[in-house]
Amino acid sequence: MPYIIVSSVVPGLIIILFLISLAAYNFVFGKRCDKNPLLKYYGADDFGLSAESVTAKSGKNTLRGYIYRDERVQPRGGTVVFCHGMGAGHAPYLTEINYFCKQGYTVLALDSTGCNLSDGKNIVGMYEGVRTAVKAVSLAKEKCPAAEIYLVGHSWGAYSALCASAECKVSKVVAISAPKTPVKTAYEASKNVIPAPAAALMCPFWWIIHLFRFGVKGNLNSAKCAVESGVPTLVIHGGRDKVVTALNGAYSAVNGENISKIFCDDKAHNPYNTVEAEAKLAELSASLRNAKRIDKSYFTSFDFAAATQEDEEVMSAIAEFLSL
């Protein structure tokens, strides 16, 4: 009798865990990421940049983005392919894109499937960002054939850049706050909502879901890709990052002759920003979570310039790495 009970209960528990894991996956990846109407997004005109629209096909979807240049500075002859994080495509990163343009680089930023300018009912999954990065590199080589190509990414975009470096030829990679694997990323996000042991139980199911969604590439380890590519790579992480902790991110796992690292003890998930800017971003994020109970005038009067102020030391270190 006990054997019969166990044999009937265990499959049921497995099915329940799988369905919960699938629901969690769809909650994160089963939707579009578009601009939030409460937020301000800078554009090329705000920085005096030229912006040439570009497109690329990814399956049935059209990916859209821009090639940015600052025509007022001497060009360096290199192209930065910028890989955005989870959110409204590359729009939240115009301050960083402007920085590279002012350094003389051409910047190509392509929105991934389901994000901002690009087609798609949802963002599909983490490997979809890698596909977009590979497409963007190919497009950069077509549009700027004489230029060296550099992959630069943040968060999901950092994962995409590291993995893409093993699939396409680039000169250098900069990965900021990079996740290591899709499963580790799902675990990190889930343990903030449910008990860590429960999140751990779902890890095998997330691995299976990514396998079925993308095949063998669905569970790529970004740290391994970075080392195996042999491409000079700079990995940057914040010591106070709770979105992608240093322990479970690529930072702790990536080591090799081609790897350089910068650890910012006092920074969180956006270490390219100042400590003060990260504090403003944290305030803004908390307000967005409670947006229904907050007067909308808060967002119209919010100091977005202060929330996007860059850390000159970190950005200069990136620029120096690319110029070597």
Image: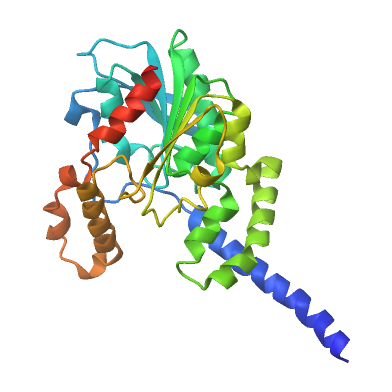
Quarter of the rendering containing residue 183: bottom right
Inspect this view and state whether residue 200 appears.
Answer: yes
Residue 37 at x, y percent in the picture: 26, 51
Decide which of 145, 324 is in the foreground and name it. 324
Inspect this view and state whether residue 167 appears.
Answer: no
Decide which of 198, 124 is in the foreground and name it. 198
Query: In this image, 200 relative to 275: left or right?
Result: right
Residue 146 at x, y percent in the picture: 45, 7
Residue displayed at 27% across by 20% down? 103
Residue displayed at 56% across by 37% down? 255
In the depicted structure, whether residue 254 falls above or below residue 258: below
Residue 99 at x, y percent in the picture: 26, 27
Residue 179 at x, y percent in the picture: 50, 47
Quarter of the picture holding the N terminus: bottom right
Decide which of 97, 54 is in the foreground and name it. 97
Quarter of the rendering containing residue 227: top right
Decide which of 178, 230 is in the foreground and name it. 230
In the depicted structure, whether residue 155 falls above or below residue 62: below
Residue displayed at 46% across by 38% down? 158
Quarter of the picture holding the C terminus: top left
The colour mode here is rainbow
Residue lying furthest bottom: 1
Query: In this image, 63 relative to 309: left or right?
Result: right
